Amino acid sequence: MNAGTIALLILRRDRLLLAAWIVVAVALPAFNAYSLAALMPAEPHRLAFIAAAEANPFTNALLGPVPGTSIEALVGWRSSVQSLLIGGLAGLLFAIRHTRAEEDAGRRELVAAGAVGRHAAISAVVAVVAAVNLAVVVGQCLVLGLGFGYPPGGTLLFGLTGAAGATMFAACGVLAAQLCQSAPLARATGVGVLVAGLVPGLVVPEELVAYLPAGWPRVARAYGAGEQWWVLWIPLALAAVLTLLAFAVSARRDLGTGLLPERAGPVRPAPRSTIGLAWRLYGGQVVSWTISLGVASAGVGWVSASFEVGTLTGDTLLEVFTYVFCLVVACLAVTGALRPYGEESRGRASPLLATSTGRTRWLSGHLVLGLAAPAAMLLAVGAGTGAGHALAGGRPEAVPVQIGAALLFTPAAWAVAGVAIAAYGLRPRAAVPVAWAVVVLSAVCVAMWEAGVLGGTAFLFTPFGYAHPSISPGFAAPAGFALAAAALVTVGGAAFHRRDLLA
């Protein structure tokens, strides 16, 4: 079995996931192109927006200066870091999924027992990621170049900059998978590298940030004057070096080991309840995400207090970003709701359920944490945005207002989590695609509503509809989604109690 065979196996196994990756990466700049053209149709509007953006230290540090005054320059500037984030995160996690996670599950050892090269898996993953990123570039060129009429040269440079950066981050994931002793540690290390590469403008001088991942789009200047194609060689050379390092580490380590072992930590007594067990397994992730969302929300609240461009006020910006944070929490709620499936599919649930711990009790422990975590994260989002806005603008009343606005989204997060739980109980192998399909369709409904394609009444029946900043739903819609979430959780729990465990 060579690298090509493994690559075909990966494509067959994750064809839906890869298709979703390509669609999201292509749709993001297309959505920005549509929305920015509608918001700023004339050059005076764009000039006012650019002046305000460059005067804002947070925006300027994160995205850098706008390379031009045309609408395509604004779209490239707005989408560059977003594309790097989506492509880099997807590639990084995908690389770890098919390398270190395969070792943790024991499947890598079975494959290695056959006639397969030691580096075949790494080569296959790198080849698949590169092919997916090239498909994203082709899609972006077709949509932006033919659909919106953007210049083909600038569009190609924009797409290749994001693809090269995403490939480099995937190579980081491959190397992290070889260095770390477990998939969670590799993911944490890789995401840390991703964050360190994409937000250096907040702490690193401008003359240095240009040579880091966040600075590559700034140097490339897609759609601007003096486009720099040579910058593409930096991420490609780094990807090649990191891949070669991964080969070298793989050749010198034993299967299942790593140079960076997990920290054992202090010896703690065994949990006395299933809730305690769920907290022991995933409580650290919940705390880290809650703190991260709170800090990011406080920064957005602080910046929004002094932001004003035409009709776009700081209060409007705060509402929009609060809604975006709520969508992130909904995605995390789905992840939390799918944790029982992860425990069962890895074979860790059956030994525990063979004891006196019943199915209902075991599942309830995960559900309590999975449903409480989104509420805690939304509370952090509301408190963070409100406190930042209050401290910068001298408006203490913003704190309770923002907390209420964020917590209003809790039933929506519970509803999408309830879909995941119901699917897990009824058809566990379909739980992951079904849950994420609901999230993607709900996000598409948001875009259709903002574009005027979907009517207001229909939009209210979608999970992300009633909490949109432009809608005042009252209490009927949140209460309805809370009841729907309770019904879905009940259905999932009852179905799980009656079905066979995964073999």
Image (tube, rainbow, N blue to C red):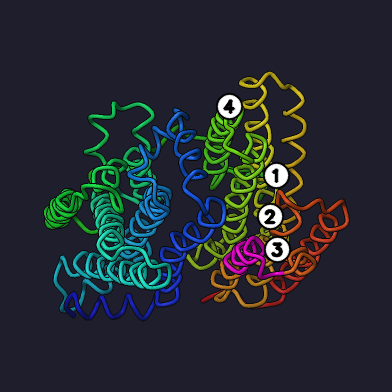
Q: CA distance from mark 4 to mark 3?
A: 39 Å
Q: Nearer the viewer, residue 148 or 56?
A: 148
Name which residue type carries label 1. Ala
Q: Are the residues at dot 1 and dot 3 in contact (C-beta closer than 8 Å)?
A: no
Secondary element at image label 3: helix
Q: Position of residue 235 (x, y in %)?
A: 20, 51
Residue 65: in sight, yes or no?
yes
Please name the residue shown 46% across and 36% down the image. 53
Q: Is residue 338 above or below residue 147?
A: above
Q: Are the residues at dot 4 and dot 3 in contact (C-beta closer than 8 Å)?
A: no
Name which residue type carries label 2. Ala
Q: Position of residue 266 (x, y in %)?
A: 45, 32
Please name the residue shown 88% across and 57% down the image. 476
Which of the two marks, 2 or 4, is nearer to us in this view? 4
Which of the two marks, 2 or 3, is nearer to us in this view? 2
Residue matched to label 2: 413
Which of the two marks, 4 or 3, is nearer to us in this view? 4
- In terms of image quadrants, where is residue 163? bottom left
What label sits on residue 375 in the rendered view? 1
- In terms of image quadrants, where is residue 303? top right
Secondary element at image label 4: loop
Q: Are the residues at dot 2 and dot 3 in contact (C-beta closer than 8 Å)?
A: no
What label sits on residue 306 in the rendered view? 4
* Region in magenta: 438-454
Q: Is residue 490 above or below residue 226?
A: below
Q: Is residue 311 above or below residue 426?
A: above
Residue matched to label 3: 418
